[in-house]
Image (spheres, rainbow, N blue to C red):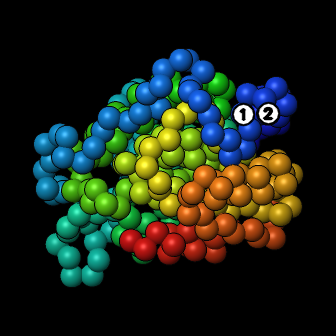
Amino acid sequence: MSRRSLLSAAALLAAGAFIPGCRPLRSTDGGSHAAHLAARPGNVATNGGTGNPAGQRPLGLVAERDALLYVPAAPAGAATAAAGPLPLLLVLHGAGGDAARGLSVLSGLSDEFGIALMSPASRTGTWDAIRGSYEDDVAQIDAGLEEAFSTLDVDPRRIGIAGFSDGASYALGLGLANGDLFSRILAFSPGFIPSGPREAKPEVFISHGRADDVLPIRATSRRIVPSLEGDGYSVTYREFDGGHAVPPEVAREALDWLGW
């Protein structure tokens, strides 16, 4: 996360635009469904998961800052990488990142855990709701999910959303707003929960470094976690000795926690 993004987020917090863990009334653009994602497994024709070699490929949604899909390698003895319904994680990069940066947090574990990853890129330097409202990024994510669902045989019971830093904040906002789609939310070093509606009760995993000097833990996760728990969400919280990062052991613990 850049210093400019940090200062911008701090200004919004100071102004009361976002309060970590708060229960918001509506999006700032006035649309109660602005954070809603329409894509669902089964909404579009699938090809049964065939013809999808393991590895990373662009989705071809836009010419610049395209989304990426990562298909895990086939287990030993399986005919294809997608032999049966796959779990899918939507993974979101931090400020100043792109789809490849988003994938990098978990791609090293994707094959081991057999989880497909879809990583979009924000239209600007960070996600729209970090700046104030859900807009173009939601449409881009929706298009990416629709493409993933049309390409892979995805298990509707095992779909989650994950992110780091600004991506973690956005994952919390978008995940809580679409709890009927995402059964799990992974938030690595979030800053706050953007305004938006809430749907169902997805389970939440949050991690944060005690020495984080970008998004200090006392002003972020240590406020977000008890607020979510007070609202009735099941939260697994892990603090670690370190800064603004996702240590490999924390990433592994998070995927273990999914139970997929």
In the image, is residue 45 above or below residue 53?
above
Q: Nearer the viewer, residue 197 or 97?
A: 197
Q: Residue at x 56, y 63 (%)?
A: 234
Q: State which quarter of the image contains the N terminus.
A: top right
Q: Position of residue 107 (x, y in %)?
A: 48, 61
Q: Mark 2 vs mark 1: which is more N-terminal?
A: 2
Q: Which mark is residue 108?
A: none
Q: Residue at x 56, y 27 (%)?
A: 26
In the image, is residue 103 above or below residue 205?
above
Where is residue 251, by image quadrant? bottom right
Q: Is residue 124 in view from this perspective?
A: no
Residue receiving disc 1: 18
**Kind of residue indicated by mark 2:** Leu
Q: Position of residue 166 (x, y in %)?
A: 66, 42
Q: Is residue 183 in view from this perspective?
A: yes
Q: Residue at x 20, y 76 (%)?
A: 78
The CA distance from mark 2 to mark 1 is 5 Å
Q: Position of residue 227 (x, y in %)?
A: 69, 52
Under tag 1, what secondary structure? loop
Q: Residue at x 76, y 52 (%)?
A: 223
Q: Nearer the viewer, residue 81 or 19?
A: 19
Residue receiving disc 2: 13
**Kind of residue indicated by mark 1:** Phe
